[in-house]
Amino acid sequence: MDGDPLGTHRVIEPVGALPQPAWKLNNDTSKLFATEILLEVDVLNIDAASFRQMQEEVGSAQKVPDKVVQTVEQRGKQHNPVTGSGGMLLGRVKWVGDKAAHRGVVEGDKVATLASLSLTPLRIFKTKAVREESAQIDVEGEAIVFASAPFAKLPSDFDARVAVALLDVAGAAPQVDRLVKNEGEQGKPPTVVILGAGGKSGLLCAAQARRTAGADAKIIGIESYSPYARDLRDLGLCDAVVEADARDPLAVRKAVFEAAGGEADLSISCVNVEGVEMSAIIVTKQRGKVYFFSMTTSFSRAALGAEGVGKDIDLFIGNGYAIGHADHTLDLVRTSPALRRLMEQRYGG
Ligand code: NAP
């Protein structure tokens, strides 16, 4: 049997659903299909918003692996029912179906999946360790990659754990590059505000915004966690790094006005908590843009919130996938030595 490239042959419930929105997938790895690739899983890189939600629910990071095992037993995949998000994984190719041979991997290759865990059939045999800082869990398990699901061979010049951390948020930098290009009025360099700027995707967005918009752009980072705010300041990517709660729109507006002297052309949400939509919206100028990379973003809060304050701004959802996103992100880090050092220090094994 070939199996459907979209993976619908693995959907158990509800019948007719695609694997991502489905409640439950068939994760039986003893029966494989010709379009599939089977991986031995070493590390689960849990989505930051999902990890934080589970940590708050079970009371400590050390108990998160049990919660993950429970979800996988119920759903056949790591699809957090509260946040709706997954993450991605690091593994080794164990078997390649006849109709997946063209995908360029052979048994033993180390790969990172670039499609969400929320659609990846997964079995966990054992959890071994958890690292709160990177939201990663070392496991023994197996996972299935569908024919339509992107993945990347691990680069040889990065520590595997750092690579998987970067690839988890690989969509952000190339999309920020597109959004920042041509931004700013009449040749005036743009103002960019990043909420959660000291986290993994926030750092990448700051680095990309600076690279694309140039030295004259104003880049303001908002970060609530002091050590990460300090890291961001030390990198020198931002004109101002403000320690503030991004869920407080008035505090964020005050901070941005003081630092930039006006509203932003582009705001970016990279937080791992709920409730920052209005901060991003009110600091953005009329006809400006907000890029919601965060998985905690609520469509209704964003759309109705912008309407409610009379802001005609373009609201973008951060697509996890962009063509060439893995290479783009790894190159950004490769060519930013200080950023690379920080990523290795934080997320390295
Ligand atoms: P991360 O490394 O945990 O970064 C989030 C940052 O926001 C952290 O520094 C965090 O501080 C900070 N923060 C938390 N609450 C805040 C607040 N109230 N005010 C200001 N800053 C606050 O997470 P990440 O891996 O970069 O992921 C960021 C977001 O992107 C998450 O929502 C994740 O789910 C999402 N994501 C989206 C995609 C996509 O395809 N669109 C893909 C992957 C991830 P603490 O350290 O104190 O928490």
Image (tube, helix red, strand yellow):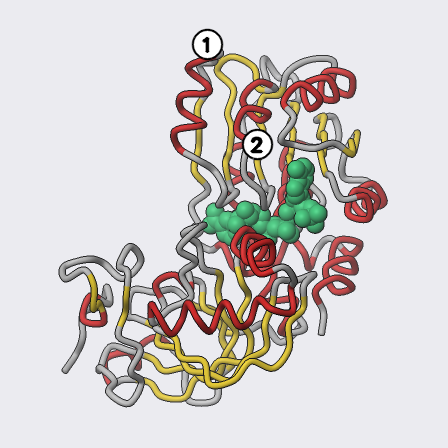
Pinpoint residue 73: horizontal percent, then vertical percent. Answer: 38, 74
Residue on which disc 1 sits: 310
Pinpoint residue 246: horizontal percent, then vertical percent. Answer: 65, 32
Residue on which disc 2 sits: 276
Along the horizontal axis of the image, is 234 left or right of 178? right
Q: Is residue 267 visible?
A: yes
Q: From the viewer's side, name the closer residue of 288 and 295.
A: 295
Q: From the viewer's side, name the closer residue of 102 and 271.
A: 271
Q: Quadrant of the N terminus?
A: bottom left
Say which label, 2 or 1, has the lower sequence index. 2
Residue 335 tag number = none
Pinpoint residue 169: horizontal percent, then vertical percent. Answer: 54, 54
Task: Tell me the kind of residue under disc 2.
Answer: Val
Q: Is residue 295 above or below residue 117?
A: above
Eye-nearest disc, 2 or 1? 2
Q: CA distance from mark 2 to mark 1?
A: 17 Å
- SS label for mark 1: loop
Residue 145 quadrant: bottom left
In this view, the residue farthest toward the top is 310
Residue 183 quadrant: top right
The residue depicted at 40 percent of the width and 21 percent of the height is: 304
